[in-house]
Amino acid sequence: MAADRAFTPDLFRFLNDLAENNNRDWFQASKSRYMESVRDPALAFISDFTEPLNEISPHFRADPRPVGGSLFRIHRDVRFSKDKRPYKTAVGIQFRHQLGKDAHAPGFYLHLAPRDVFLGMGSWHPDGPTLRSIRDRIVEKPDEWQEVLDAPSIASGDVELVGERLKRPPRGFDAEHPFLNDLKRKDFIGTIRLSQKQATSPGFREVVAEGFATGAPLVAFLCRAVGAPF
């Protein structure tokens, strides 16, 4: 696997410029730059990430299709939003589980934006039945969940567990449960902060692969909770 640069600094310059000119005319005039500096390098990264992803788990997919693959579309869905800016100002890449149909299934995620580069691992905004399955697994297999919390990367804070939480205990769960703070979670996501310099340096694929591997215990637990192989 080649270790060439996946991205150049112009990816971040383009996203900065897009934030200042978030309209269709500017984007159409700059589309060749978008393709050269953003879309094509992202698709190349996805294609080249197949092997390292398979080493973490054979059940996740690096899909380099321009539409419907791992790369999130640049267009925003503004139908029900007061914010009518048409374009996203970040690059999102998700490596979905083979059984996952949307972004809510356990997965791995790479986010690239000016001054905001990070890895995400886990389940973001899972639906009600999925969330219930995760909470049930924590209650039924507390030793397994403790192993996740004790994983060196999570215990040290290198992988930070983030996301929304309920203010009160979820219905049907013990308000005195030792993992109550985790049962309150509405998201089960671990993140690792990275830098623009890392993203535009040789070996970035290896950095991403190592980061995902450190968060794999969380993703494996979530897969078991929903009956998906890891």
Image: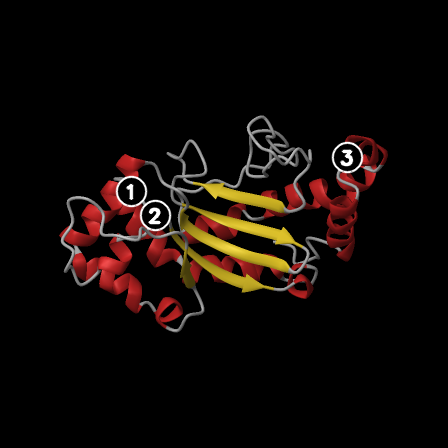
Residue 75 in the image: x percent, y percent? 65, 33
Indicate which disc, 1 or 3, sits on the residue closer to the N terminus: 3
Q: Is mark 2 on a helix, strand or loop?
A: loop
Q: Mark 2 points at which residue?
A: 186
Q: Mark 1 points at which residue?
A: 131
In this picture, residue 179 sits left or right of residue 211: left
Image quadrant in which you'd find residue 162: bottom left
Residue 23 is marked as 3
From this view, report whether residue 181 is shown above or below residue 44: below
In this picture, residue 57 sits left or right of residue 118: left
Gap in Å between the C-alphas at discs 2 and 1? 7 Å
Front in this rendered view, residue 201 or 128: 128
Gap in Å between the C-alphas at discs 3 and 2? 34 Å
Neighbor class of circle 3 (other Cα within 10 Å; few <14, some 14-19, many 20+) is some
Front in this rendered view, residue 64 or 145: 145
Q: Is mark 1 on a helix, strand or loop?
A: helix
Q: What element carries label 3?
A: loop
From this view, report whether residue 140 is shown above or below residue 64: below
The structure residue drawn at horizontal position 73% and vertical position 46%, both measured from the top left corner, is: 19
Front in this rendered view, residue 199 or 164: 164
Cβ atoms under marks 3 and 2 closer than 8 Å? no
The structure residue drawn at horizontal position 73% and vertical position 48%, both measured from the top left corner, is: 15
Amino acid type indicated by mark 2: Lys
Residue 117 in the image: x percent, y percent? 60, 58
In this picture, residue 91 sits left or right of residue 175: right
Indicate which disc, 3 or 2, sits on the residue closer to the N terminus: 3
